[in-house]
Image (spheres, rainbow, N blue to C red):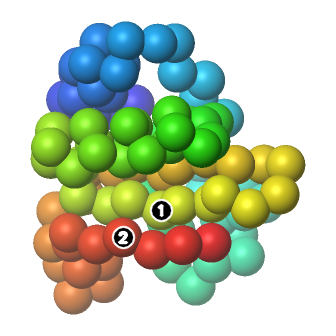
Amino acid sequence: MNPEFIDKLNDLRLAFGKPMTITSGYRHVSHPIERKKQTPGAHTTGQAADIAVSREDAFHLLSLALSKGFTGIGIQQKGSGRFIHLDTLKNSPERPRPTIWSY
């Protein structure tokens, strides 16, 4: 994992004031999720994590993540596997940042 990303994630955790369950961190390009993609995703850079969170905690975490400068935010708030993806990738033609998307 990228040390600067870990520092930013820890800063977010301290501001959140609760434990954060990471459901996905670094993924090798051979990981089944990454192999399905045309281009390996943010997780392969060591600058991304998915955090299990829902309802009012999701809103609070999202608000904090925006204020802390996370550049990529993906939101999955349907069904049983609710999470928020956070990354710190820089803007590029392949990955425009900042951006928010839903799954």
| Horizontal side, residue 47 vs residue 33: left or right | left
The structure residue drawn at horizontal position 23% and vertical position 58%, both measured from the top left corner, is 71
Q: Quadrant of the C terminus?
A: bottom right
Write down the residue under mark 1: 74
User: Is residue 48 visible in the rendered structure shown here?
Assistant: no
| Horizontal side, residue 70 vs residue 49: left or right | left
Q: Secondary structure at mark 2?
A: strand
What number is the disc on residue 8?
Answer: none
What number is the disc on residue 100?
Answer: 2
The structure residue drawn at horizontal position 70% and vertical position 49%, both measured from the top left corner, is 82
The structure residue drawn at horizontal position 52% and vertical position 39%, both measured from the top left corner, is 56
* Nearer-the-camera pick, 63 or 32: 63
Pinpoint residue 32: horizontal percent, then vertical percent. 78, 60
Q: Amino acid at mark 2?
A: Ile
Which tag, 1 or 2, sits closer to the chain's start? 1
Is residue 51 placed above or below 30 in the rendered structure? above
